[in-house]
């Protein structure tokens, strides 16, 4: 018996197609509508032939009133800024909303305006939004009606630093987050810069000292530390379709602290987490071992100079987007948190 | 008229094949012999079909006495530790030697022994070795008879930091070097860990807090700064065959220093360098734009928190190995420094 | 309640790891033992970190007597020729055996000896082997105790030609099968020829006019046609880890036959097949849409000169090996044929 | 002393950038102007940072009158149909023109109109065009003023079949050409279908039984054979940026003909050709060994059923476009035919 009706707005991007892929085999969920402005009227399989279980299903335009009754939960995978109003519409009418854009992640609307160059028109809704990182906010998520699903880079950065910051074993100046992402992070679009020939065999940094995920990282790390943190964050573009790995550096307060002790702190922090996997010492994550899954794998080491190095890897489209959204849905609706998220990665 | 006879020892690896590729079109150089223990007797084109101008040329075993008269310059692309004795043999008999192994890079034999777990048996030769990074040591190279050709990671790290350290605009604690290398850096070998299926679509760190290039980086940065530096260095493995990019972080002494000023310091430091290319502000290097060339491209930015970010990219087999060796040869023999190194990259 | 005990012999290759991945979530199956000579004693996750649900499980040596009672079904993913005896051992003792090697595929032991250069020592067992291609032999498989699981290339070739040959709409001379395979088809091994650097960015044919899958293809096509067929078969190596696509050419007997008619014949032939998916006219398979799945997708066109072109794509490790083996197991044990094989591909 | 002034029209695509790369180091050639409608006013290095020797050079709009005096030779890398008029303009005013579009390749304007859905407005110019495949038409090229530079697929197909057709050792029915191309063949454009995420890890056929290179192949093969030939041609898209390989099948007239004999015919046909390289028997081409070069490598085998298999590989942007254009220029201007085309491939 299906009992959760899910609507996906903005379903023609990679985040949308991943939501469709992950939700398909969950018996308790029924995808009742999916929208796309550009592809309204087209079949899902015209854009995504791999989603063959959706044969015959079509995208429709986002007509909010018409959709309202179709969903118990609304996944919004709209572009940033386009999401503001749709979120408020469904949420204010009593629906559970999981927003995968950045529109409800930054608690301070002024910071949002600074980085996104537009006003936030719904400060009341913003106040009710819960940052949907279950490892930090599971209890709030359980009772939330509006989830701001975290960005992919922030997910890797925060999970890599949370135990160390909480236990105050690192200094908060000189935190460096060097991140590398697969190309799907840029979305599904016609842009010569993301064409195969411009990416294959290459590797580069982008958005250096200017990426919009920086304030989101700062906000969450500051909340954990209880004091303002301003990180150095550099994203890079890997010549692979999906996966993300962040190498995070922070000076240990006590340079003589043993790595075993650090490792214990991480193990303890995540011992009950189904998707935060602290690897044994000496092992480091590889993107391919989390591809297609909701796992975040974490490894660590310490440099001779007393700098802690933490490495975290996720699938940017799963734990970094659609999978985390489903994890949040599971929590909000009282399902087993791992429902639909247990698949092993396809390797090689 | 050919006037420089070149012998390549250990020519069956990628460093060797790149030496062959680069030397082939140089009229002033004649490759007279090339050795390989495993492939002695085989034709070059059996291993490297792309080197078709070497049709008929065969690898021979490394018999030092037999080779001695065949060369004016000896390129040694032997495994680490295997190079110690061969270097000393040719060098002590009056030949110019360019060693592409790590055996003569670390000035302090105790540091060498610590990291390579063997004694250095030729401390006298070691004293005469010049670290072959032309941007720092061109004058010494001109008169040297023994060159320790730099490692690929150190080349990116040192060129990224040299102007800032020399002008003392950064603090020397908290230097982080986050490096990403193509797979050819691991050499040409039978090892399931480097098989296509184990690498494709993946990305991971390796040698975390333990890579042997760390002391080489520390040595050279300390020499520039005039005080001991211990960096945090993390190498990663990119799913591409060649190319290397390092993202280097260091706190500015004056967090308010303008990026324009930093940029000028870099432009000035490298203005006469044929292969150190400081990009305009706002531009960052991409590995594909240096592939197959001897260029090191450098870009920079500053984080809001006052951390300087410098990004450098090279081809690990060219500026990181064979190309830099030829550049050193050119300097040692009074050729134009760019001889054989002017080819544009093949993009896409 | 687990009721089928499965033993996997030769589980440290990619076929083995795929069997583990596919069997893991099937409630009705319990993997009770897995063997590897080279990796006996090691944990599964040491070789395959992505198979984290097998944490703590170890490979053991193949001691036939010790394994006998552990399994209801034995999957043998041993090298060719090594499989002969193990198959016979388990089979003659009443166990169901699914052999993923080539040892029991060729019905004529003389042909086997010609291509594999060894005798077949168990002609009686050979006679009982059923060729495990469900689309052709489902009824025989249901009652079989020994399955010769088809090769990956033959699976694509046979499924591409079966409807046309059965309906006798093509001539049987001049059949050309041009196949392209991902690198995982070569297995998991230390071999410089399959190292990342030797494969990336390349593409080539191999085994031209000499590949051992040729007699297997000839045998099965001849059986369908009822007359001897000798195909032209050329395999190529794609620079991707997994996936296989064959482009198959055969002259239509009636060059004026409409493509619609041909398409109907294919649709009819496979209408009840869960894993043979005939695409609409105008659509052609892409490897990425079947990756990680047991699907064979088939498209077709006709050249102006009256040649029929059929294109089939599979995942070489799934429908071309482990997935088809599980499909055979499902049939043999009366499970739903799609059990464990319903997962959507992870795209992009 | 520069003595050939070259103008490149349509220089902002990959064919254009390759012309720039190849012409740069040729002392006898001076690139005096390059046009692009979309990028007029932009610097070459803004689009192609790897072409750093063109620093400061800008694209200009294609104003025919203004360009006329700037060139001795005009390379036209315009889209199909856009080239018709520009070719005629420069050619009728006494300039040498090398057209890299398809507009002057098909001798019969009716065939052109059938495949390109537009009229050919300059039948007189068309009559004067020489098909620029030097291995077939070197003498005509030497005296030509208008070259129709061959398509990439036809180059591989014709060079693979020319010796066999000329010596009449194969039947002309049942010729199958199975071709695989890197993505750069689709040009440099914003199109989600050619985005990295839609291509990476995939492989598929396209333009099945409908590709516009078919009539070009038929025309040239028919001319060699002296009788009409209609081939079966299927192009596929490889997940690599550049390179092309065709596997060509044709029944031997005498199925018992020895492969040695066939090989001799090929060796003889191409013995004086600088860029048609017939490999020793048992060796087959790999795209990576011709990447970035003007080489066409050719290998061959015979199936047991008497079908000849010929495999040819080129770089689609070099021998398949810009390199062949430069080869034609060299012939037309009496330069050494290999000028600018001697570079070894960068492998791995």
Image (cartoon, coloured by chain):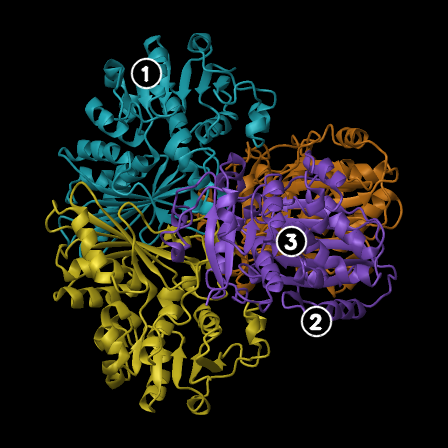
Chain colours: A yellow, B cyan, C purple, D orange
Q: Is residue D184 left or right of residue A200?
A: right
Residue tagged 1: B145
Nearest the camera: A264 or A64? A264
Against D118, is D293 above or below?
above
- Pointer 2 chain: C
Tag 3's secondary structure?
Answer: strand
Label disc, if present, on residue C271 of the rendered structure: 2
Tag 1's secondary structure?
Answer: loop
Nearest the camera: A113 or C13? C13
What is the CA distance from the residue labelled 1 to the residue labelled 3? 69 Å
Q: In front of the other: label 1 or label 3?
A: 3
Say whether residue A117 is visible: yes
Please state the horizontal and vertical placement of residue A293, each as a whole percent of the image.
41, 62
Against A158, is C148 above or below?
above
Q: In front of the other: label 2 or label 3?
A: 3
Hey, which quadrant is residue C258 in on the image?
bottom right
Q: Around disc 3, counting alpha carbons within 10 Å, would you say few (fewer than 14), some (14 to 19), or many (20 or more)?
A: many
Q: Around disc 1, counting alpha carbons within 10 Å, would you say few (fewer than 14), some (14 to 19), or many (20 or more)?
A: some
Residue tagged 3: C147
Tag 2's secondary structure?
Answer: loop
Say whether residue D247 is visible: no
Q: Is residue A53 left or right of residue C234?
A: left
Q: Which residue is drawn at the image coordinates 52% and 22% (left, top)?
A: B39
């Amino acid at each position: 018996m299906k009992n959760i009706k899910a609507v996906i707005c903005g379903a023609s991007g990679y985040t949308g197609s991943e939501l469709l892929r992950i939700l398909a085999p969950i018996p308790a969920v029924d995808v009742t509508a999916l929208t796309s402005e550009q592809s309204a009227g087209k079949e899902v399989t015209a854009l995504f032939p791999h989603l063959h279980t959706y044969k015959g299903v079509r995208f429709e335009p986002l007509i909010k009133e018409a959709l309202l009754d179709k969903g118990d939960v609304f996944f919004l995978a709209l572009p940033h800024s386009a999401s503001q109003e749709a979120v408020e519409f469904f949420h204010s009418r009593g629906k559970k909303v999981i927003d995968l854009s950045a529109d409800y992640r930054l608690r301070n609307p002024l910071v949002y305006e600074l980085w996104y160059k537009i006003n936030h028109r719904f400060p009341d809704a913003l106040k009710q939004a819960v940052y949907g990182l279950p490892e930090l906010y599971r209890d709030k998520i359980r009772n939330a009606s509006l989830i701001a699903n975290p960005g992919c880079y922030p997910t890797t950065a925060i999970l890599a630093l949370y135990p160390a910051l909480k236990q105050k074993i690192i200094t908060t100046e000189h935190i460096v987050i060097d991140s590398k992402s697969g190309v799907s992070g840029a979305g599904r679009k016609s842009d010569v810069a993301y064409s195969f020939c411009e990416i294959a065999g290459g590797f580069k940094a982008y958005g250096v000292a200017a990426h919009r995920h920086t304030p989101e990282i700062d906000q969450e790390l500051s909340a954990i530390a209880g004091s303002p943190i301003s990180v150095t964050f550099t994203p890079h573009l890997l010549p692979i379709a999906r996966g993300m790995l962040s190498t995070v550096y922070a000076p240990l307060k006590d340079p003589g602290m043993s790595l075993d002790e650090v490792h214990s702190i991480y193990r303890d922090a995540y011992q009950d987490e189904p998707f935060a996997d602290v690897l044994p010492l000496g092992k480091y994550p590889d993107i391919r071992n989390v591809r297609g899954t909701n796992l975040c794998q974490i490894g660590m080491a310490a440099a001779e100079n007393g700098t802690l190095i933490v490495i975290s890897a996720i699938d940017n489209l799963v734990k970094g987007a659609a999978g985390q959204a489903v994890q949040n849905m599971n929590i909000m609706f009282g399902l087993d948190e791992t429902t639909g998220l247990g698949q092993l990665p396809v390797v090689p």
